[in-house]
Amino acid sequence: MSRVDYKAVVPTFCNKTVERPNKASSGTLSGHAAGEPFEKLVYRSLKDRYPDNIYKQFEFLNELYSRHPKLTKIDARKSLFNSPTVLFLLSRGDKATKEWNPTNLFEEKQDDTADALYNKDNYFDIIDVKTRNIGKKAMAPNIISAVKLAKMCSLMIDNEDYENIDIHYVEIDWLEDGEKLKCIESHYADLFKASPDSLYINWAAATQIQFHVSDLEQGWQGSKSDWAHQYIKTFVKSAKERCKTMLSRYVCPYLKYLTEQERKEIFGEDSSNISISVSIEGMVGDDEMTEDTLSLLTHH
Amino acid sequence: MSRVDYKAVVPTFCNKTVERPNKASSGTLSGHAAGEPFEKLVYRSLKDRYPDNIYKQFEFLNELYSRHPKLTKIDARKSLFNSPTVLFLLSRGDKATKEWNPTNLFEEKQDDTADALYNKDNYFDIIDVKTRNIGKKAMAPNIISAVKLAKMCSLMIDNEDYENIDIHYVEIDWLEDGEKLKCIESHYADLFKASPDSLYINWAAATQIQFHVSDLEQGWQGSKSDWAHQYIKTFVKSAKERCKTMLSRYVCPYLKYLTEQERKEIFGEDSSNISISVSIEGMVGDDEMTEDTLSLLTHH
């Protein structure tokens, strides 16, 4: 259950205007540049409503580490997170965490998971703002790495850590309005209310999940534990399908240009059958799998 | 052999300046916006030197179709290309080609293959300009789709069509210089002089080949036919390796979260072995392969 009252907050963005980040005369607005003032608007509104609980991701990390100045080792800093899932989603890399000190604070990073973060005690709501020029037809934007989400689900399951994390998306639909940009519609969605099967993974676009927030199906009735298991199933199935597609599109049509010798070199001795194969004996239940367990088999 | 004298033209870009596309005060220049004035500079220089032979890709298509106003059917328009390879690389999609008429000309498109095109008789040199702010460390840029290149190679081989096409890249390295941007170094490279094995395919980044032009190895000694065969081999090998990596990173570590029933559902009855397999009997030498020839096998 989210502690942020999206139902009350999100409609207030409608009809709000922000300054154009460039002159109307200087041509097209890039999507990223246009989005920034609306991201700031959403952040300020949330901060006004929940002044003690809303952070930028980097602010939260700076405050957390600043409160414990004696913890300077990386593992000690990591131990400040009660939840391994939250640690995984919010913390910076090992090098940056090691180099952090009160005179070397974190700054905003474009690939941070959250645009805004609601925190109370051990509960975190990751809030990501997507802005959209509805004067143009645009593809669904990158939402989050499907790989990151799979890892998050595995951590949730391993640690029975389902209550500490929510992830919400806010969509601001805007149009140009003279020297301003105007919010025409606003939407929000709860990632854990979307059926995992309905999420589209674009393997060729940095394995990103892509959707328009306003189109996100919100019919999932199961628990967050159910969601995590179902997402992993969806992810594994999609990875397998992508492999099949790659073999079918990128390998098969080109085999005829290779000599038998070259085919053997790439795919092994029996060149009548091309196979990529993994033995999972002893794998299920293991914590870690190595590249060595992956073997390329040929079949006789 | 290129007909464009890159060795003479490219060094002339050094120390040239262009106007900043935005005010220095308005913050960071996006890579794309900054590149445009230099792309125009390169185009104008080439056009000055070869006024009858340098085109924008869309200009060339507009001229070609305008010269044959009676050919309105799509196949007739396609027949204007002597080379199927050139047709594949330069023409627009079927819908756009059908809808073309003298009052509905093509305009510039960001995903056109060429920034500039040298044409004389049946010979085409595709020229792509890459601009680079050398004040920043940046990843190697997207050069061309590895899939498009594989298709191009297959067309070259099928049609023994090696003499009509060259592909060259020009790199402009620039720095901010007050209200101007200044070219500090300029480079060029011939795609068919780079060993195909040395090309990096980023499967997760829209299957793009990525390199800095100034780093491109230029030691390939073989013919263009050798190059096409070698590229296809590299491409097939890389696709197979990517599949293995995907199984190892995205499937194996998550199998333990699936029930045996779920594993069977996704991978078939024998869940001790996960295999993605293609029978290539009868495939080698065939022109077309269907999805049906791809089977998911389990092994006993």
Image (cartoon, coloured by chain):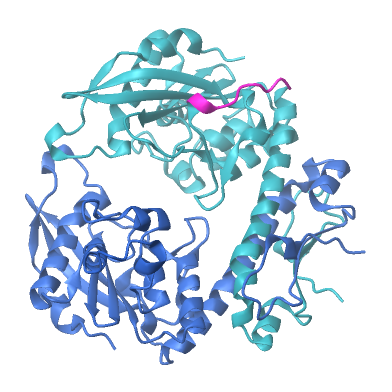
Chain colours: A blue, B cyan
Q: Residue at x 26, y 65 (%)?
A: A65
Residue A275 in the image: state x and y as whole percent.
78, 61
Answer above or below: position of A62 versus A32: below
Q: Nearer the viewer, residue A283 or A23?
A: A283
Percent across and percent down for residue B5 are 50, 10
B263, above or below A245, in the image: below
Q: Which stretch appears magenta? A: B214-222
Judge by depth and name the residue closer to the eye, A95 or B5. Answer: A95
Is residue B217 in the magenta section?
yes
Q: Residue at x 73, y 61 (%)?
A: A292
- Horizontal side of A232 relative to A279 (left or right) equals left
Q: Main secondary structure of the magenta part?
A: loop
Front one among B49 and A244: A244
- Mark yes or no: residue B23 visible: no
Count of numbered marks: 0
Q: Looking at the image, can residue A209 be seen?
A: yes
| Quadrant housing residue A256 | top right
| Residue at the (23%, 77%) spot, across then down | A119
Q: Residue furthest right?
A: A300
Residue pushed farthest front? A70
Give percent across and percent down for residue B70. 49, 32
Give the percent coordinates (x, y) of residue B4.
51, 13
On-image quarter of the N terminus of chain A: bottom left
Side of B223 relative to A236 (left or right)? right
B290 shown above or below B216: below
Question: Is residue B107 shown in magenta?
Answer: no
